């Protein structure tokens, strides 16, 4: 009897083990299946992009801050700063105090060093910006202290950024899409726009890590004499500001999906190369204080770009904005930035396949 009971218990144990094994297999199967099935990302990705932003500098004195403490900086375009990615170039650092070594021996009132109060970072965040380039000359106006504090502030607000040698890129996910963002410039402590082979290697690596790779560059000469894309190195104040045409094409060859340029402080042409969109300069978007806003320096595009799941260009709506020393950022009802972008594209890229109509850029049929 005892032997019979033992036999029954053993049989019961085997049944339970088989049952548990079967149940575990059923539970684990969906997990394995989920991991092996490719992610489906959205058909259309929205990228809103603008150029240089500097909301007011407390250096050399607080008189260089706007009267409303910058709280209304983006009021005129508030409803437009929407999208999966909202990008701009951070033309300065976030730092509450300190002097700039670049102004040693120079009248500070004639020195272009930009130090925005830390509280201004919240204005960017509240406006909708979630990706900023820190690859430019002004983020380093206050040396390592300014760069480190800017990084700390942006991290605290969960704003993505890249472009300094210690932060060449960032990979992040939003709404099931994996993005990689990297930024380049010709300036000290930035990832160099002039080392094209290195840029290609980085972009190629990022393409294995992300669905969409966005590249930003700060390059080219500055001002009205530098509206055109020359397809050669641009020398400005004895500094090699890069061959932005060669750079943009090279990073797209390496896997970039969108290339967003800034630096010349004026609008430049756009191009679609291998189905990928390039903006060669997005101009001065929202800049207060010591920026020249005369003529075409005072107009800029707000680009609302649409790409597909593979990063290919679909179309872009362009909202033209304007600034001057009295009237800050406002919508330009004359659409000058859009018109200038068309004129420059027609001149610099003869035979292009883009259609400019009704403030929209699309591919010709």
Image (cartoon, rainbow, N blue to C red):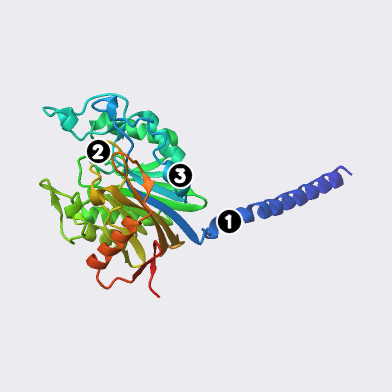
Per the image, label 3 sits on a secondary structure element best described as helix
Where is residue 325? Give x, y as percent: 28, 39
First in sequence: mark 1 vs mark 2: 1
Camera-side mark, 3 or 1: 3
Location of mark 2 (residue): 138
In the shown orientation, is residue 25 left or right of residue 340?
A: right
Check whether the beta carbons of the residues at disc 3 and disc 1 lie within 8 A of each other: no
Where is residue 92? Give x, y as percent: 28, 37
Q: Is residue 329 visible?
A: yes
First in sequence: mark 3 vs mark 1: 1
Where is residue 213? Give x, y as percent: 38, 55
Cα separation between marks 3 and 1: 39 Å
Check whether the beta carbons of the residues at disc 2 and disc 3 lie within 8 A of each other: no
Circle 3 packing at 10 Å, graded few (<14), some (14-19), many (20+), is few
Q: Residue at x 75, y 50 (%)?
A: 14
In the shown orientation, is residue 230 left or right of residue 139?
A: left
Report the number of discs: 3
Cα separation between marks 2 and 3: 25 Å
Where is residue 69? Give x, y as percent: 37, 30
Q: Residue at x 20, y 40 (%)?
A: 188
Q: Is residue 264 visible?
A: no
First in sequence: mark 2 vs mark 3: 3
Check whether the beta carbons of the residues at disc 1 and disc 2 lie within 8 A of each other: no
Camera-side mark, 1 or 2: 2
Location of mark 3 (residue): 78
Quadrant of the image containing the N terminus: top right
Question: In the image as oriented, which residue stretches furthest toward the bottom?
Answer: 365
Question: In the image as oriented, which residue stretches furthest toward the right?
Answer: 1
Location of mark 1 (residue): 34
Cα separation between marks 1 and 2: 46 Å
């Amino acid at each position: 009897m005892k032997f019979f009971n033992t036999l029954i218990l053993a049989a019961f144990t085997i049944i339970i083990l088989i049952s548990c094994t079967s149940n575990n297999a059923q539970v684990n199967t969906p997990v394995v299946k989920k991991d092996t099935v490719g992610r489906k990302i959205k058909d259309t990705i929205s990228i809103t992009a603008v150029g240089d932003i500097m909301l007011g500098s407390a250096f050399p004195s607080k008189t260089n801050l706007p009267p409303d403490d910058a709280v209304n900086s983006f009021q005129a375009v508030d409803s437009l700063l929407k999208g999966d990615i909202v990008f701009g170039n951070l033309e300065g650092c976030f730092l509450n105090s300190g002097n700039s070594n670049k102004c040693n021996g120079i009248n500070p009132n004639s020195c272009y060093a930009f130090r925005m109060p830390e509280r201004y970072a919240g204005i960017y965040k509240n406006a909708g910006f979630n990706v900023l380039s820190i690859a430019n000359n002004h983020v380093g106006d206050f040396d390592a202290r300014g760069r480190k504090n800017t990084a700390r502030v942006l991290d605290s607000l969960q704003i993505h950024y890249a472009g300094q040698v210690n932060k060449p890129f960032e990979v992040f996910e939003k709404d099931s899409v994996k993005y990689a963002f990297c930024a380049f410039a010709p300036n000290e402590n930035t990832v160099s726009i002039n080392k094209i082979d290195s840029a290609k290697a980085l972009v190629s690596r990022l393409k294995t890590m992300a669905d969409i790779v966005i590249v930003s560059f700060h390059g080219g000469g500055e001002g009205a004499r530098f509206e055109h894309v020359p397809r050669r190195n641009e020398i400005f104040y004895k500094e090699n500001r890069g061959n932005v045409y060669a750079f943009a094409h090279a990073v797209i060859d390496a896997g970039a999906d969108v290339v967003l340029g800034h630096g010349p402080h004026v609008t430049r042409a756009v191009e679609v190369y291998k189905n990928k969109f390039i903006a060669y300069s997005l101009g001065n978007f929202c800049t207060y204080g010591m920026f020249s806003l005369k003529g075409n320096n005072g107009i800029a595009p707000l680009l609302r770009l649409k790409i597909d799941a593979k990063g290919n260009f679909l179309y872009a709506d362009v909202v033209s904005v304007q600034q001057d020393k009295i009237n800050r950022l406002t919508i330009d009802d004359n659409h000058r930035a859009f018109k200038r972008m068309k004129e420059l594209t027609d001149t610099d890229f003869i035979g292009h396949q883009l259609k400019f109509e009704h403030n929209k850029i699309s591919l010709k049929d």
